[in-house]
Image (cartoon, rainbow, N blue to C red):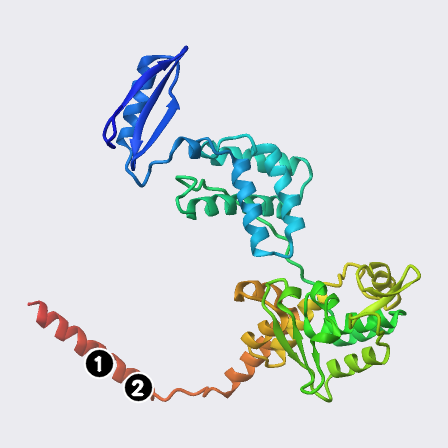
């Protein structure tokens, strides 16, 4: 039996031929077809591989389903908050690609999957999320030590034009808030409009996070989507302090939550689904029915930036980790564009309208032109 990297042999087992070879002192065996010629070609191909490109048989037998399992395990270890959504997106991937060998997945198969999902009336953003997880599974496998795949296939994404454009100016928000009959929901929505925090983070705010000596609210990292905690000051005369004072007045000792409500006859329940009240308030305030509660987050970011808050500070308050994601929320309206043009026009009006260079008489300009032509002719001679 050969023991060095550069040697190997073929042998027959029943009706099939097998190959055996060593890499890094480890013996590998694998089936190589039903003919001696096929086995010889397979052995030569493996011997030509460099150590960096070599993948043992157990790795080459990996399926896409195995890579998806590794990804789910990796995300569980990280403790991401959206694991349930990940599992729902992984399911159609596993149903379609789970039994395919990881090395066999290529771009045409991915594009065929995207077409089938779109034909099934799935939103392009949903299909993109699924393909992003597939790409993430391959990248994770490629970065492992030792790597589990030799390459990451090109996985294109669909073009998505679903950016929200809605926001609530102050007058519209005040009209909306006045129509919210549930005062607990009104406090929740008002906090949302001022801070731009994610609704899930607001729901998890507890009295243990409130420091009444410094009047700051410290969001626990476990309650944040990004797993990074942050501090929210509560100035004495500010709107957030007023909201907290109202919540203190209706605080329940049997409920740790700052924002809670009575639901289905039970008190001290988290404020989750208030879409019915939201739609009723929009209708009563004569506002567009297409406005969503999440538009409050976009409005808060607009207000911060327009109010002169630095981008980095606004991102710390809202919980954004990247500037690109923040910029998607910071929408420019027609009023912003109109104001920009007005400021530009006002600036241009301050610029001098008269030239600093005196005009030459016409006969003097003709003399200069004639002299220049004569010098050019002389230099050419």
Q: Is residue 59 above or below residue 169?
A: above
Q: Residue placed farthest to the right in the image?
A: 265
- Whether residue 175 sits left or right of residue 328 in the image: it is right
For the residue pair 282 and 52, the one nearer the viewer reads as 52
- Whether residue 223 sits left or right of residue 78 in the image: it is right
For the residues marked 2 and 1, what is the alpha-carbon distance in whole angstroms?
10 Å
Looking at the rendered structure, the secondary structure element under dot 1 is helix
- Whether residue 268 sits left or right of residue 118 in the image: it is right
Looking at the rendered structure, the secondary structure element under dot 2 is loop
Q: Where residue 266 sits in the image (x, y, percent)?
A: 90, 62
Can residue 172 be seen here?
no
Residue shown at the point (82%, 59%) measured from the top left = 275
Task: List the residue tagged with mark 2.
Answer: 360
Can residue 195 be seen here?
yes
Q: Quadrant of the C terminus?
A: bottom left
Residue shown at the point (42%, 39%) measured from the top left = 149
Q: Quadrant of the N terminus?
A: top left
Find residue 368 and name its label.
Answer: 1
Q: Where residue 265 sits in the image (x, y, percent)?
A: 93, 61
Q: Is residue 98 above or below residue 147?
A: above
Asked if labels 1 and 2 touch by Cβ distance under 8 angstroms, the answer is: yes
Q: Where residue 222 sits in the image (x, y, percent)?
A: 64, 64
For the residue pair 1 and 74, the one nearer the viewer reads as 1
Label 1: how many residues lie within 10 Å, few (<14), some (14-19) or many (20+)? Answer: few
């Amino acid at each position: 039996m050969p023991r060095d990297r550069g040697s190997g042999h073929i042998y027959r087992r029943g009706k099939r031929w097998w190959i055996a070879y060593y890499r890094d002192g480890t013996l590998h065996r694998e089936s190589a077809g039903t003919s001696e010629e096929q086995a010889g070609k397979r052995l030569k191909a493996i011997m030509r591989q460099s150590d960096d490109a070599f993948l043992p048989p157990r790795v080459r037998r990996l399926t896409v389903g195995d890579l998806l399992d590794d990804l789910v395990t990796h995300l569980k270890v990280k403790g991401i908050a959206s694991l349930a959504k990940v599992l729902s997106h992984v399911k159609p991937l596993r149903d379609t690609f789970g039994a395919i060998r990881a090395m066999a997945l290529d771009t045409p198969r991915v594009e065929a999957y995207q077409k089938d999902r779109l034909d099934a009336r799935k939103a392009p953003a949903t299909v993109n999320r699924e393909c992003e997880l597939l790409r993430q599974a391959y990248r994770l496998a490629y970065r492992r030590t030792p790597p589990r795949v030799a390459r990451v296939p090109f996985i294109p994404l669909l073009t998505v034009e679903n950016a929200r454009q809605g926001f609530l100016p102050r007058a519209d928000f005040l009209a909306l808030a006045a129509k919210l009959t549930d005062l607990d929901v009104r406090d929740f929505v008002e906090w949302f409009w001022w801070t731009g925090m994610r609704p899930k983070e607001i729901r998890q705010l507890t009295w243990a996070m409130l420091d009444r000596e410094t009047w700051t609210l410290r969001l626990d990292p476990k309650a944040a989507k990004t797993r990074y905690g942050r501090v929210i000051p509560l100035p004495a005369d500010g709107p957030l302090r007023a909201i907290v004072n109202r919540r203190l007045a209706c605080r329940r000792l049997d409920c740790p939550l700052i924002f809670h409500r009575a639901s289905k006859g039970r008190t001290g329940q988290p404020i989750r689904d208030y879409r019915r009240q939201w739609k009723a308030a929009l209708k009563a305030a004569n506002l567009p029915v297409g406005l969503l509660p999440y538009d409050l987050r976009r409005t808060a970011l607009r207000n911060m930036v327009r109010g002169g808050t630095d981008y980095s500070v606004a991102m710390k308050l809202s919980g954004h980790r990247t500037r690109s994601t923040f910029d998607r929320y910071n929408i420019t309206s027609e009023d912003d564009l109109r104001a920009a043009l007005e400021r530009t026009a006002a600036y241009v009006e301050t610029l001098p309208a008269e030239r600093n260079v005196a005009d030459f008489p016409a006969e003097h300009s003709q003399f200069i032109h004639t002299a220049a032509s004569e010098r050019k002719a002389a230099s050419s001679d």
